[in-house]
Image: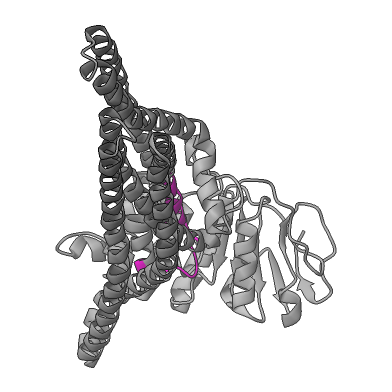
């Protein structure tokens, strides 16, 4: 992991605890609260003006047309024209601000995901390729829509509340009809939204599994054909696809009820208000202008009540997307930029002197790898690269795969005896390194990852069993060149290889398996006594 990353836009930095979906949403929305508030105010103004237009129409009818008063007609007509001009301006400005906020939010999440897969050793350990694809292409866009959902939700709520108040002022029975409709909507829609969230979650999980299974099958297609397993994997993929189709139908079935309510309930509002308004006008309880206003209010309530249900639908999908993203990012501790207290551990730390080649020989390899990962993600690590077997190789030319300059490119390949890698790529028809290095052997992939880390010339290099797929001669050459090329820089290798131990300045044997769970790796130039369960063979 490289902790000396270039400076980035502050808008790309998450703040706060992202361990839950609501905290993730707060981390995305929080830094942009002022612009979001501005958008909400603009949309609220637009909604207020829109719902007041029928009131102006009622004044034109009652005070102007019905009384044949030219002055009143001109006065209220001018007022209506002036107010109506405010509506599109406020709408346009509000939507523009929300669109910019959503674009920045998508960029923010994509930037973090890109860091996870671009820098060696920091990709989430439990996240698959399918999950990465779906988080970037689907969940990120849904999460970013939180701005428009909040903006539209507040706008719809203000407009709906204002409409109900205005209708109630015309006549009590009109207001009662609306109140009954609101209660009925809540009772009907509440359980449907709960089931919708569960089915949306199931669908997203199945989609990620299917995408990942397809990617794994394609990557291993040559091997599968060689051992006759193609048909078996095809059958498993077909079954997985049928499961996805079934979950899609369940989600669509539940979602269709929400959409049906969006259409049916507003229509019920309109029919009830128009029918009651007509009866009240016929009986002389309200005027013709008030009937016209009631009809206008009913039209607005049709739109805003349906939008409120749509907002509730969006909240469910945003929460599901936030759950998926927060779980995906949970392996990246650098997301939490606030200072945190260091974890308390049992036992004394392993002490490694700067500028030396140190080899850690573990009783259990996984525990020692975890030590390096914890150190690489700690505040003590500066200009540090962690190389592990989970590092990704992207497709491109060999120079692009190494992500370095021409001079460092040749030196880094030479340091890992990579001449055969270069000749293998140059002799290929496309002269490209394939995704994940699939056109290279296991040993070549391991050396290419190591060469990429060497080319970065970091002050501290952490290697997890870097030569496990190599023969002894190649391993001997790499260990010797690593010792020479990184003289004066800190290199820590987790390996049981005697070759690495022979070139090490310091060798640490972890003999107590229980102790490994409680040891943190510290970086200190001072001589400190180590844990008694370890044998520290430091040369200085």
Tell me the magenta residue range: 105-130
Instruction: Measuring from the top left, give residue 280's x and y in whole percent.
Output: 31, 40
- Residue at 42% in and 48% down: 176
- Residue at 35% in and 71% down: 203
Q: Is residue 329 left or right of residue 166?
A: right
Instruction: Indicate whether residue 112 is drawn in magenta.
Output: yes
Looking at the image, is 214 positioned above or below residue 35?
below
Report the number of discs: 0
- Colour scheme in use: one colour
Q: Say which of 137 and 510 sits in front.
A: 137
Q: Is residue 117 left or right of residue 301?
A: right
Instruction: Measuring from the top left, give residue 251's x and y in whole percent.
Output: 32, 70
Instruction: Measuring from the top left, give residue 57's x and y in whole percent.
Output: 27, 25
Instruction: Measuring from the top left, give residue 328's x and y in whole percent.
Output: 47, 62
Looking at the image, is 533 positioned above or below residue 376?
below
Q: Tell me the quarter of the picture where residue 67 sits.
A: top left
Q: Say which of 418 and 137 sits in front.
A: 137
Which residue ends up furthest to the left in the rendered image?
429
Looking at the image, is 227 positioned above or below residue 259?
below
Instruction: Indicate whether residue 452 is drawn in magenta.
Output: no
Q: Quadrant of the C terminus?
A: bottom right
């Amino acid at each position: 992991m490289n902790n000396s990353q270039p400076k980035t836009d502050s808008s790309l930095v998450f703040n706060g605890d992202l361990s839950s979906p609501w905290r993730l949403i707060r981390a995305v929305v929080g830094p942009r609260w002022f612009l979001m508030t501005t958008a909400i105010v603009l949309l609220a103004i637009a909604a207020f003006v829109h719902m007041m237009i029928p009131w102006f129409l009622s004044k034109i009818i009652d005070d102007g047309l019905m009384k044949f008063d030219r002055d009143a007609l001109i006065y209220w007509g001018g007022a209506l024209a002036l107010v109506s001009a405010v509506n599109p301006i406020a709408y346009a400005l509000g939507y523009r601000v929300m669109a910019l906020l959503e674009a920045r939010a998508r960029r923010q999440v994509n930037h973090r995901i890109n860091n996870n897969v671009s820098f060696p050793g920091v990709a989430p350990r439990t996240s698959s390729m399918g999950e990465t694809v779906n988080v970037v292409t689907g969940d990120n866009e849904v999460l970013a829509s939180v701005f428009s959902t909040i903006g539209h939700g507040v706008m719809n709520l203000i407009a709906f509340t204002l409409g109900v108040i205005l209708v109630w002022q015309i006549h009590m029975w009109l207001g009662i009809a609306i109140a009954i409709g609101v209660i009925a909507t809540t009772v009907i829609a509440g359980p449907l939204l709960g089931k919708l969230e569960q089915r949306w979650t199931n669908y997203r999980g199945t989609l990620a599994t299917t995408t990942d299974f397809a990617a794994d099958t394609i990557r291993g297609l040559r091997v599968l054909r060689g051992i006759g397993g193609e048909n078996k994997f095809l059958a498993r993929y077909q079954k997985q696809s049928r499961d996805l189709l079934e979950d899609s139908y369940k989600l669509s079935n539940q979602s269709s009820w929400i959409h049906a309510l969006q259409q049916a309930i507003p229509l019920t509002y309109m029919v009830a208000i128009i029918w009651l308004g007509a009866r009240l006008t016929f009986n002389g309880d309200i005027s013709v202008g008030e009937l016209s206003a009631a009809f206008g209010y009913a039209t607005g309530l049709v739109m805003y009540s349906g939008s409120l249900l749509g907002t509730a639908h969006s909240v469910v999908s945003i929460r599901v997307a936030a759950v998926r993203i927060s779980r995906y990012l949970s392996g990246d501790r650098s997301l939490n930029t606030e200072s945190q207290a260091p974890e308390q551990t049992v036992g004394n730390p392993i002490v490694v002197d700067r500028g030396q080649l140190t080899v850690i020989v573990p009783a259990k390899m996984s525990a020692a790898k975890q030590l390096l990962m914890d150190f690489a993600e700690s505040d003590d690590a500066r200009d540090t690269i962690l190389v592990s077997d989970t590092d990704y190789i992207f497709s491109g030319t060999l120079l692009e795969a190494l992500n370095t300059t021409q001079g460092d490119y040749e030196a880094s390949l030479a340091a890992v005896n990579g001449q055969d890698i270069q000749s293998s790529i140059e002799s290929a028809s496309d002269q490209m390194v394939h995704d994940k290095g699939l056109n290279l052997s296991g040993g070549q992939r391991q050396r290419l990852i190591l060469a990429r880390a060497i080319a970065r010339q970091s002050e501290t290099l952490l290697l997890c069993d870097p030569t496990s797929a190599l023969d002894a001669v190649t391993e001997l050459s790499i260990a010797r060149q690593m010792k020479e090329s990184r003289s004066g820089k800190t290199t820590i290798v987790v390996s049981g290889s005697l070759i690495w131990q022979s070139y090490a300045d310091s060798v640490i044997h972890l003999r107590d398996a229980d102790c490994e769970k409680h040891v943190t790796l510290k970086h200190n130039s001072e001589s400190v006594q180590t844990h008694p369960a370890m044998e520290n063979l430091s040369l200085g």
